[in-house]
Image (tube, coloured by chain):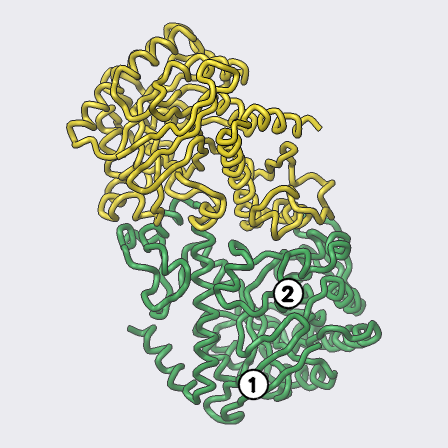
Chain colours: A yellow, B green
Amino acid sequence: MLEFDLLKENEPAGEDRSRLGRITTDHGIIETPIFMPVGTVGSVKGVSKEDLDHCGAQIILGNTYHLYLRPGCDVIEPMGGLHKFISWDKPMLTDSGGFQFFSLAKLAKFSDEGVNFQSHIDGSRHFFSPERAVEIQMTLGSDIMMSLDWCMGHPATEAQAMEALKKTTAWAKRGYDFWKSRGGANNLFGIVQGGMYKEFRSLSAQQITDIDFPGFAIGGLSVGEPTEIMYEMADHTLPLLPQNKPRYIMGVGTPENLVTLVGMGCDMFDCVMPSRNARNGKLFTSFGAINIPNAKFKTDERPIDDACGCYTCQNYSRAYLRHLNKTKELLSYRLNTIHNLYYYLDLMGKMRDAIKENQFLAFKKDFFSARQE
Amino acid sequence: MLEFDLLKENEPAGEDRSRLGRITTDHGIIETPIFMPVGTVGSVKGVSKEDLDHCGAQIILGNTYHLYLRPGCDVIEPMGGLHKFISWDKPMLTDSGGFQFFSLAKLAKFSDEGVNFQSHIDGSRHFFSPERAVEIQMTLGSDIMMSLDWCMGHPATEAQAMEALKKTTAWAKRGYDFWKSRGGANNLFGIVQGGMYKEFRSLSAQQITDIDFPGFAIGGLSVGEPTEIMYEMADHTLPLLPQNKPRYIMGVGTPENLVTLVGMGCDMFDCVMPSRNARNGKLFTSFGAINIPNAKFKTDERPIDDACGCYTCQNYSRAYLRHLNKTKELLSYRLNTIHNLYYYLDLMGKMRDAIKENQFLAFKKDFFSARQE
């Protein structure tokens, strides 16, 4: 079961709304604010569990849609659940599939009952009701499960956003009731939708927080809208979520996004960006991102970032990483992913330290000014 | 500089001709018989240097043809040589490019002067003389360099095999003289060719061993001929090589090949098989090879091989490895490669122990009978 201890909250209504917390789950403790690396089908692409430990990962995310299709519950259940199957003994969060129905599944058909969708792998048809989405996550054994939601893209009309909002609320209630009826083990979070309409976000937040979920997420952001609108929605919605429960913004974002949103009071993040960009050779540093394939790194003996303590920076030059990227060597994906995940998780750790020491605004200022050099 | 200590040789003319040796290089000691993982462009595909340590790698191989094209000497030279560039501080052997001219380079044209070839990457034209092949390897800083040779496929006519043999001898002399004229640092090995003709193998061995190379290789095997012919050529040629210098059969082979050829007195091997097969899901075990994608492993909780001490077998089930293979996860390549390389290097270690304890024939018998179960 989840416990959330809000260790510190700076100025709930002021310029610095950053929070320091601690989530306790059956698989261990998560210090917030935290970033969760994405392990889509039961593996964070390119890295091992020891790499994740080195990077400072406290919790990883699995995608229910992907795991349901491959390897499927008929494998994960007899193997003793997802933790055992993938040999990961720390906390794990799974999403509900809602985002994949929006981004990936072909011909997803939404009804009051749930979502009828076609596998992106073999075209087979499947159905997720809000109950089934929770049931699958219970089979996976996730420490934190997510309610089935309807994630709307951008732009969406008021009518579309309202329809998605209504279904998300109805499904949240059904998922919650199902979860409780099955004993309420582990944790189920509710998701606020409402598109890019503040009044809809308010309404959704009110309806979703009326349900006694152990934590709350803001979904439907980072779906194509300008960053300023994403910030506006987050800034509007975060204060509407209960103070004493974790707040999670799904699928966000860049390092700059994380620093900004932590300043607005967000506790949890996930995003494929650090791992996906790593595979493409885009590496994050304390002075901004660099593209390692760039010819200027051809004989550059320096590490990616002198200020970085990761395995990659301690062992390899930009020149070698460029070579591995150009030759598409498997080691390239691993070394770059280690660096980017380390960067993200180290950034979260630095933010936690800054909050602890009442230095978050100064940290934020330094963070952004180092990028403008 | 290379020293070779022949610590033990069982029965030079008998049924068990296995040898135990120790090669000392500037970058450390190699215990023979040994298998050398292949790090084509400066990375053993899928694994890190720590993984290689775990697998028991004492020396790795780099391909001069590939490294010359990418990243090129204009990168490796200013970066301080290949060891420094790739962060590998143990011994390294590089081939001469001869095998790639046979297998990969388009429109390679052989003349007395050397090989004019077209890059398989961008079609650009390049020229390797025997001197240039050595010079490039000196720039790489290889502990063991190989003479430029002409590797003939199978089948080849007598005329073709003889032409390749003659050029290989002429180039060996020129490469050796060049190496000596440049100070003779590190080590240069000669390569015996001669196709699948015993009398040519004898002639080539005589000509090549007339040159005072620190070690000798048998090239042109495993180029499409039946295994029995490969064994016949190795069995014929190995005794023609000097007893007090290392003997290396290039590009071979299966675990069964290694055990058989160690029994014939071979000291060194390299092959892409363990790493390439790993990426395809073919895994070596003490009871033969298994194909991890096979449906029968779907919920198999056992490790690949109960008898294996590798990281993969200590941490992951066949079911998870099957899942990673089916979903083409990057972790699949790494975990499988660690297992296969560990298997190969552990096999070499077991053979060294058996030779030391005068048990090689018993070991060989057990090895093959375990595969017939």
Q: Residue at x 66, y 75 (%)?
A: B25
Residue count near mark 2 (Cα–Cα under 10 Å), binned few <14, some 14–19, many ≥20: many
Residue B213 lies, in percent from the top left, at 71, 80
Q: Chain of mark 1?
A: B
Res A146 → quadrant: top left
Q: Assign a secondary structure to mark 2.
A: helix
Instruction: Look at label 2 and name its amino acid.
Output: Phe
Residues at discs 2 and 1 in contact (Cβ within 8 Å): no
Residue A87 lies, in percent from the top left, at 34, 49
Q: Residue at x 34, y 42 (%)?
A: A28
Residue count near mark 1 (Cα–Cα under 10 Å), binned few <14, some 14–19, many ≥20: some
Q: Assign a secondary structure to mark 1.
A: helix
Q: Which residue is mark 2?
A: B99
Q: Which mark is residue B236?
A: 1
Question: Does residue A193 appear to the left or right of B93 in the view shown?
Answer: left
Instruction: Look at label 1 and name its amino acid.
Output: His
Q: Chain of mark 2?
A: B
- Specify the quadrant that holds the N terminus of chain B: bottom right
Q: Earlier in the sequence, mark 2 or mark 1?
A: 2
Please tell me how many numbered marks the rendered image carries.
2
